[in-house]
Image: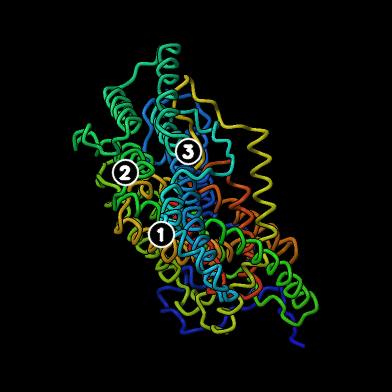
Amino acid sequence: MTEKPSEDPVPAQLVDAPPASQHESFSDAALDPTPPTRLSVGGWISWIVIAAFTVFILGNTTLQQFGERESATEASSSDLMQVNLQAKMVVGQKSLLATAAMVAPVEEKEETDAPQETKDDAEIEDDVALEETGDVKDGEEVEDVEKDVADSEVLELPAQDLSMLDSGSYEQRLCYAALQNEMEGPEAALEYLDELDAKVTEHDFERSAAQVEMESSVRSLMENYRDGDLSQDVLTSEQQQQLEDRLGFSGKLLLNPPGADTQTRAAMASQSQTAAVAAVLFLVMGILFFLFGIVALLFILTYVLTGSSPSQFVATSNAHNVYVETFALWLIAFFGVQMVVGHLELLQTNEQRMIANPVFFFGSLIVLLWPILRGIPASQMFADIGWTPKQFFRNTILSVPAYAAWLPAVLVGFFIVFILMQLVPMPTAEGEFAVPSMPGHPIQEMLAGGGVLTWVTIVIAACVAAPIVEETMFRGVLYRHLRGVSMKYGKEVSIIVSALINGFIFASLHPQGILVVPLLTTLAIGFSFVREWRDSLWTSILMHAFNNSMVTMLMYFLL
């Protein structure tokens, strides 16, 4: 059985002695075999910086979501993501039903083509007589099948309550009109537009010129469709482009109604069908993965608690003050630089911001030079923060079951967020057509209208850069400091407190807002526990990358 590592301070291994002129430098303290666990002056200053960034970022996102501010009256692409996703699900379901309607007659025809009993002479004469009199038309069965397929566009969908989407911004109401046309036809959409006009008058809502023009365009299209004309000739190319740009998928849906024989409609149906199938597959896979996680959790706990696979992390107070200084410098290098760049408006477009994102991430790792400048050998620093190749293959394999094993705890985080959203509901936007403020990530705005380049940069930033850099700084640098400064309270207390503080700071520095903090904290605690267990960042990096990749992949298929 493997012996458990000691939690007592471990003397640092002596390396090449520093020059005599540096005997008063930090290197002597870093290599002190019995260093103190208390914070130095630099450590206290660093924690003030960490607290300032945490409070500022969390407070800023909370203020944006809950603070009093003038309500917006024009929605952006990200504000319409929910209604456009619902529209995509509706089209996807219709596409699946149409496919089923095409397959069913073919199967029936195959059954009728099966060998039958031989007819006698009298039956053959009757069949010939029927054909001569025209009572049986050639190809009648094929025509019936083609009619069924043609009518598949108007197949009834399962009853869905979409009334919740009939709210919010004026643009969302126009998207809802597109849903009405998709599910009930142009007459229903025109009736809804009349109701919308009545609400505008009732609430004395002053529409912008673009909103007035879009409503006029939608009404003209519905009138054309009601009269049987499915073309878009009634609109100019600029008006058509305006609907697509401002309303996204719903705008395309308005320009390509049910029954339209266009390549765009076919592509939208295919894309929506893929999204509908992907949503179901992700749900099924999520349930199976969750069950697998429960089994994995039992195995991991058994191995850890019985000592078969003990914690490999060895806490030491050597140089823990340097590591908190390093983390504080990273906050300045990563968030501080981005704030300055944003204030100076050096990046004008979303594409420029997305390309710069990985640069900010990887560029901020330059702060890892600080421990070296402070006298800690590079090899020691890499070992301290978990950049070690030990048991590389095993740690790689363990990343998936370790992530699955933590999913039950993540589900608890989801539940806490749900309870908080019931107890502390999002503020209601003032005005009938105001745009509500909802928790979310700024990346949503880029995804809503992004192209191939946007998606590539998002994958690099979210699935590669973020896991490497965030795990290095949070579970590598900060966790090393937290375990060193709290080890005097005992191993169990030190692990729990370090993981909680680490997770809370990690969650608070994300832009989703205070309501999502419990979920992100829970996820980060799992990463810290795995760091403690394996003493290598590689496993937690892969877990982090796997989590972000699943979220990114789901958004890709759904959006």
**Placement of the N terminus among the 4 image quadrants:** bottom right
Residue 556 horizontal side relative to residue 278, left or right: left
> Residue at the bottom extreme?
1
Q: Nearer the viewer, residue 444 or 238?
A: 238
- Kindly state the secondary structure of the residue where label 2 is placed: helix
Between tags 2 and 3, which lies in front? 3
Which of the marked residues, 1 or 2, is nearer the chain's N terminus? 1
* Amino acid type, residue under disc 3 in the picture: Met
Q: Which residue is drawn at the image coordinates 28% and 52% (left, top)?
A: 351
Residue 240 place in picture, x, y as percent: 25, 37
- Tag 2 residue: 342
* Amino acid type, residue under disc 2 in the picture: Gly
- Tag 3 residue: 183
CB under 8 Å between discs 1 and 2? no
Which of the marked residues, 1 or 3, is nearer the chain's N terminus? 1
Q: How many marks?
A: 3
Disc 1/disc 2 C-alpha distance (Å):
83 Å
Residue 427: image quadrant is top right
Residue 233 place in picture, x, y as percent: 21, 36
Q: Is residue 504 above or below residue 139?
A: above
Residue 480 place in picture, x, y as percent: 58, 66
Residue 478 appears in the picture as rendered: yes
Residue 224: image quadrant is top left
> Residue at the right extreme?
306
Residue 95 horizontal side relative to residue 313, left or right: left
Between tags 1 and 3, which lies in front? 1
